[in-house]
Amino acid sequence: MVIKKIPVGALFVLISIIAAVYPFIILLAIAIGLCIILADTLLKRITQFLFAIVAIAAIFGPYLSFPGMGGLFLFRIVLLLHFVLFLFEKKDWQFLKAIKVPLLAIGSWIGFSIVTLIWSQDLQLSLRAIYFQLESFYLIFLVVYYVRQMQDLKKLLYWIIPPFLLSIGVGCYEMFTGNHLWYSSLAGKGYPDYRPTGLLTNTNDFSSYLSIYFPLFIYLLFQKNMWWRWLIALSSMGILFFLVVASESRTGLLAFGIMLLLLIIKLFSKLISGILLFIGINLVSIFLLVMQLIGKQEFGYLVGKETSTDQRLLIYETGLNVAKESHFLGVGIGVVPNYIFQALYGTVNIPDDMQQTMSAHNFWLATLADVGILGLCCVLFFFIWLLVYACRQFVNEKGLLTGTSLSILIAFVAISIGSSSIFEMRVVWLGVGIALAIVHLNLRKKEEKI
């Protein structure tokens, strides 16, 4: 491996400066020294192994952290270590040729965000937001870079589906007992709360997670068509439906319904799909009506959240006004929650101990107000490109896999207009990376046939 002396020297100087404040950074210097000694082949094996840890740790989040240091967990440590080692690895950029345009689009979004640091009124919030952007982009990049064939995709699914099933088990435990794990936002309230959060922090995040990863579970389950697999699929679908309902997330329920619709279309013929959808819609309608008549509160949030809806509309109006006042150039990445808090404080019920920020609850509106129309166009281009190719493959290609990628993207779109923390959700961006990897594999398959 050829060593470039100037970049390596500059990196060591930077690490020595940072080490004065954060001594643990010296571990990076040791890692760099090791990767200089190691051969390319061994280095690739190490980075591939670290990618597996990154994928698994992304789901567990702060539950794999040092005691008392919830912000410094395994995912972030391994992701940083992987980035350092990857700098010295010989890259195969040619493999990403088919998706370089969407990757450049999301990279441009980060570029516009960095530019807004010039006029940002809160650099701490902006730097924090840029970190999450870089984290999300690198996570997407890792998935599409390492998933080079179908076998790699299946291997990735075998890594992330067990934590998914564990999270479902935790959600069921929460739904029946009202108790929660220590990093859940519902823990420590002093009274039972039967809304599930699983391995995530809040109910909206959990319902989003279920809607995005259930298609991957179904795809992995139906690698072989056996009757007992159908039994597992139907049982798990019922369990997830009740978990999503119990989470009281309307966008999560919408995403789950659309996801099931797409999976049914791919699993069955058009006639059978139509019959199943007709029966399913009628059964769900009757079930909801019966629950309403007998006074069950589990479904009351579908129509009984007038206060929450009004508050969301006020948040959206505030976000749009912030974008207009900035002449659609943005007020600085990550700063909009501060504006929303200031606008809503005193008009809605805000706890006294709440931090001085409030989410826009809309990823697209927050992006517009944060980085302006140019930044929003970059994000929209990425997702529109991905959605167009996923739709084409859904229509033209047979098999459950193309339905999986489209289901993930539709779930993301549904969730993005209601979730308060999608910007920081590792599991969501990991799912987006998987959807992009599936589209990429199909594009490469067509290129090879030509």
Image (cartoon, grey):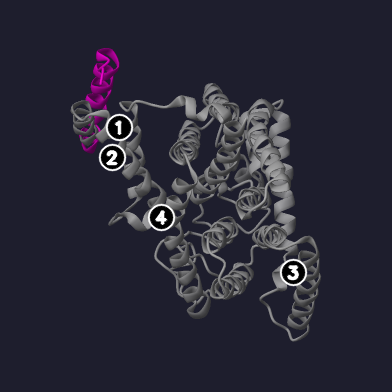
Residue drawn at x 35%, y 49% as measured from the top left = 53
| Residue designated by label 4 | 159
Residue type at tag 4: Trp
Overall secondary structure of the magenta section: helix
Considering only order in the chain, which callout, 2 or 3, is on the residue closer to the N terminus? 2
The reply to whether the C-beta atoms of the residues labelled 1 and 2 are less than 8 Å apart is yes
What residue span does the magenta drawing correspond to? 1-26
Considering only order in the chain, which callout, 4 or 3, is on the residue closer to the N terminus? 4
Q: Badge 4, how many Cα within 10 Å: few under 14, some, many 20+? A: some
Position of 157 relative to 225 (above/below): above
| Residue designated by label 2 | 46
On the image, the x and y values in percent for residue 90 come to 34, 25
Residue drawn at x 46%, y 66% as measured from the top left = 165
User: Which numbered dot is residue 85?
Assistant: 1
Residue type at tag 3: Gly
On the image, the x and y values in percent for residue 191 come to 49, 76
The image quadrant that residue 238 belongs to is bottom right
Q: Is residue 449 left or right of residue 94?
A: right
Q: Foreground mark, 3 or 1?
A: 1
Residue type at tag 1: Leu
Residue 72 visible in the current orientation: no
Tag 2 secondary structure: helix
Considering only order in the chain, which callout, 1 or 3, is on the residue closer to the N terminus? 1
Residue type at tag 2: Ile
